[in-house]
Image (tube, helix red, strand yellow):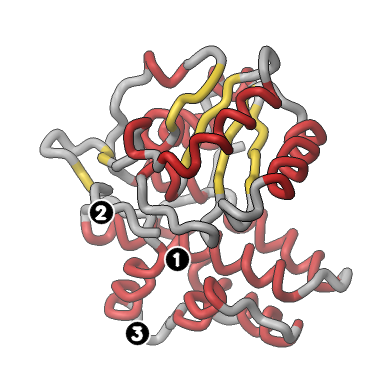
Amino acid sequence: MHDPREGVTPQGTIRTGARRQAVSPVHEPVLRAAVDAVAGRCALYLYGSVATGTASVPTSDVDLLSIGLTAAEARRIAGSLSARFRDVCRELSIGPAGWDQLDEDGDEAYGLRVFLRHYAVHLHGPDPAASLPAFPADVRAARGFNGDLARHVGRWMTALEQGEDPARLGTRVARKTLLAVAGLVSVRDGTWTTDRRSAAGRWGQLEPQTSVESLVAWLDLPPTDPAAVQAALAGPVAAVTEAFAAEIGRWDV
């Protein structure tokens, strides 16, 4: 869901509506269970529509980020909590990150710090985001968020060749590509947004020959035909990837 508070401050830094007090009471049992499940092992953050108070029950996801959990631990805990709270959320996900990433100098680490500072609500454990400054809404932040788009495209093509379910793959393609579109729109318009739908509409005005509306449709109704995913990868996804690399850049590592 769109965060109506997202944008740019008068000082030129990123502004969002992510805050602890925005969380709906209906999601509090989910968050308590997640904290209990990871107790003592990591830092845990909430992000997404639940963090901005714009989530819908039970169709929105509960999105968590951990620092310190292994990928296997994150998948196991997320799977268990998703099943337990299916009446509250569509799915609970936990993205794993490492402590060492916070101190690195590259684009990926910079993007993580920006994300923690502006989009993540602290739930448990040490809170490195508390000491981070506000970050500028600029090209570097956009690159930190989506400079890995070309890498994802390669993985998507491999997954398609290996017969992955087109609905699951198409959803990933749409979400990541449209987030990159939001970065392009932000840089071109001198603003800041991660809202996929509004960014796609603006992109259609800026680049009418490169429509991404088919990807927007996949946010609600994922594709069932692998050929549709193949066409998207060769068409709008390739165009967005090329534009992003030229105007914003790719990760430096």
In the rendered structure, which amino acid carries the disc numbered 3? Pro
**Disc 3 to disc 1, C-alpha distance:** 14 Å
Q: Amino acid at mark 2?
A: Pro
Q: Quadrant of residue 115?
A: top left
Which type of secondary structure does the marked residue at label 3 adopt?
loop
Residue drawn where x is 68% and y is 79% of the image: 229
219 above or below 19? Answer: below
Between tags 2 and 3, which lies in front?
2
Residue type (three-letter) at the residue carrying disc 1: Ala
Q: CA distance from mark 2 to mark 3?
A: 26 Å
Q: Quadrant of the N terminus?
A: bottom left
Q: Which residue is mark 3?
A: 208
Name the spot of residue 209 as percent of width and height, x first: 40, 86
Say whether marks 3 and 1 touch (CB < 8 Å): no
Provide residue 157's location: percent of width, then percent of height. 75, 68
Please determine whether, in this image, residue 123 is positioned above or below residue 85: above
**Residue sitting at 62 percent across and 68 percent down?**
171
Seen in the picture, residue 95 relative to 7 is either above or below; the reply is above
Where disc 1 sits, the SS reads helix
User: What is the CA distance from the residue labelled 2 to the residue labelled 1?
Assistant: 27 Å
Residue tagged by mark 2? 4
Q: Are marks 2 and 1 in contact (CB under 8 Å)?
A: no
Residue 113, numbered circle: none
